[in-house]
Image (tube, rainbow, N blue to C red):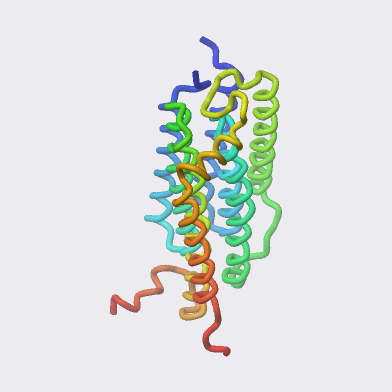
Amino acid sequence: MTPGPEAILFYVLSAVAVGAGVQVIASRNPIHSAIGLVTSFLAIAGLYVLLHAEFVAAVQVLVYAGGIMVLFLFVIMLVNLRDRPPLRPRLRGAFAAAAGLLAIGSMLVAAGRGRLLGTAAGGPGTAATGNLEAVGTALFTEALLPFEIASVLLLVAMVGAIVLARDLGRE
Amino acid sequence: MMPVPPQNVVIVSLLLFGIGVLGVLTRRNAIIILMSIELMMNAANLNLVAFSRQHAHLTGQVFGVFTITVAAGEVAVGLAIVLALYRQFNSIHVDDVRLMKE
């Protein structure tokens, strides 16, 4: 049997995710590692869309590709700037950018395809109510206690990060 | 019916997790080690979502959202520790941090 378009997208996104993951641990420059990491995150978000987990995909893009990557880049800039050669445009960077664009484009195509086909595959909560509504209902009913605990955990992490990163010597 | 067999998703997740383990074991830069840990958490999350789809049950996705939340807190604290290390040792290579070894 011939692979359908979703299967092809799956294999392309998987290859991008794994290849960018290799770049994370293989490149000498931490900035290149960060670019590989964000490419991998975006490709994995595309995989989530393919698996009809649209809400998780959106959270992945917002939290990982948005928040966590900014944190990583800030710390790399704060810590690692000296004894590094200045950034030059390189083939590997261009490849990572192309892979990221490919991942985003695939996500858009997958989203459009899901709308066109009416998501007849019928995953959890995709039929009539939509994935976001189903996940939201689950979060606020059966998973309410873990949800509140997660908010407390985030508060604790925030306070801990501020305390740890504060410069105690200069007060 | 999934577009791809679920074992393929598991294989991708396994590859990502292996890359993460390799990064943690081989790299000495603390920031790269944190990135590798993120890769491993993503691999686990991919498994959760894939099995959620396989069993047509939402719990996997809800758990995935919690995993992402925990990962965000972990990265914030981890990077704060990296910053504190840098202030203390002027280096972020984990080989340079050996206070409790000596």
Residue A8, compared with residue A30, is above or below; it is: above
Q: Residue at x 48, y 67 (%)?
A: A156
Residue A66, compared with residue A110, is above or below; it is: below
- Residue closer to the observer: B14 or B70: B70
Q: Name the spot of residue A16 as percent of width and height, x first.
A: 57, 37
Q: Name the spot of residue A169 as percent of width and height, x first.
A: 53, 88
Q: Residue at x 45, y 37 (%)?
A: B59
- Residue closer to the observer: A99 or A50: A50
What residue occupies the far left of the structure in this picture? B102
Q: In this figure, what is the number of numbered marks?
A: 0
Q: Is residue A41 left or right of residue B93?
A: right
Q: Is residue A8 left or right of residue B42?
A: right
Q: Residue at x 53, y 34 (%)?
A: A14
Q: Residue at x 47, y 75 (%)?
A: B85
Q: Name the spot of residue A142 as percent of width and height, x first.
A: 45, 42
- Residue closer to the observer: A166 or A54: A54
Q: Name the spot of residue A113 as percent of width and height, x first.
A: 67, 23
Residue A123, compared with residue A27, is above or below; it is: above
What residue occupies the far front of the structure in this picture? A141
For the C terminus of chain B, which image quadrant?
A: bottom left
Residue B23, compared with residue A170, is above or below; it is: above
- Residue closer to the observer: A82 or A6: A6
Q: Is residue A18 left or right of residue B98?
A: right
Q: Is residue B98 left or right of residue A118?
A: left
